[in-house]
Image: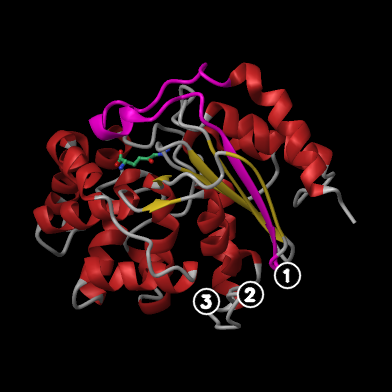
Amino acid sequence: MTDYQGILNRIYDEIQPLLGQGKVADYIPALAEKDSHKFGMVIKLIDGSTFKIGDADEQFSIQSISKVLTLTTVVKESVDFLKTRCGKEPSGTPFNSLVQLEYENGIPRNPFINAGALVTTDQMYTNFNNPKRDFLKFVRKVSGDKDVSYNEKIARSEEQTGYRNAALVNLMKDFNNIDNDVDKVLDTYFHQCSLEMNCEQLCDTFSFLANRGVNPKTGERILSIRRAKRINAIMLTCGTYDAVGDVAYRIGLPAKSGVGGGIVALVPGELTVSVWSPGLDKKGNSLAGIKALELFTTYAENSIF
Ligand code: DON
């Protein structure tokens, strides 16, 4: 049996010099309030065994990690979404880039860059009666936690400064790839990004993707085996933006990051692992978090490769 707690203790010691080196995201002013010295990490096996270290119980804004969850609701209802409205190739560009979108006629490269996530939210808006409420209900179900909520202050803070996202959604509207009102799509997107979780809740939420589409706590099937495989594949190839090659090379797991400093990764059939440290590297991924996950797959001698 792998000594997961021992591995976490070792990682915690080794990442200490990195804390404070990254830069907390301040383009969303409310995110800048977190201390870049914070660090938490959780490993959760499919059987529920849980191992924690550091600030693992502190809640943070999951930001782009929510894009995996909106995509999950959309692929359940709209089977052609990834054929018609959004691609599934790495973009090789920053997560909020506008340039490629114009060349490619308003079809985003993948659902995890901001443009792709906005189209996903637009599709969710079409599929749900009350998208903000229904999406939250879905997240509460997969996380198994009825207290998971949006943070209105963070959603408002992003709304007040979200000029790039407004530009992306308007450009796609011009290319007829947004069906709903742009302000309503943006409002839902800012709210999904403002969802707050701690590391353990994040592991619980993603455990259906580690368990071939079935929530291991309840036994409920959330996605088919084939769709779970596909979402994991997109996490591997697009989940950490223009750092995906480096992340596959160093970590070797499907992973999704957010500018709140969270990253969740999984070993299919075995476990979920999440890490939070708000100091980001130049590509917008948690600096200490990426290192911690690299150390995890190295010490556990476990990756998908
Ligand atoms: O739209 C944004 O810019 C943020 N709400 C989310 C970006 C994000 O988390 C990208 N992650 N690395």
Specify the amino acid type for callout 2: Pro
Foreground: disc 3 or disc 2: 2
Say which mark, if any, is on residue 216.
Answer: 2
In this rendered view, identify the residue nearer to me: 147 or 166.
147
What is the crowding at mark 3: few (fewer than 14 residues within 10 Å), some, or many (at least 20)? many
Q: Which residue is mark 3?
A: 223
In this rendered view, identify the residue nearer to me: 88 or 32.
32
Q: Check disc 2 and report its element: helix, strand or loop.
A: loop
Foreground: disc 1 or disc 3: 1
Q: Are marks 1 and 2 in contact (CB under 8 Å)?
A: yes
Q: Is residue 143 above or below residue 165?
A: below
Q: Check disc 3 and report its element: helix, strand or loop.
A: loop
Residue 150 image offset from top left, x and y in percent: 29, 55
Residue 113 image offset from top left, x and y in percent: 38, 44
Q: Is residue 192 above or below residue 167?
A: below
Q: Is residue 213 inside the magenta stretch? A: no
72 lies left or right of 131: right
Q: CA distance from mark 3 to mark 2?
A: 12 Å
Residue 121 image offset from top left, x and y in percent: 27, 60
Q: Which residues are magenta?
A: 19-48
Q: Is residue 39 above or below residue 127?
A: above
Q: Is residue 60 above or below residue 69?
A: above
Q: Which residue is mark 1?
A: 47
Q: CA distance from mark 1 to mark 3?
A: 19 Å
Mark 3 or mark 2: whose residue is earlier in sequence: 2
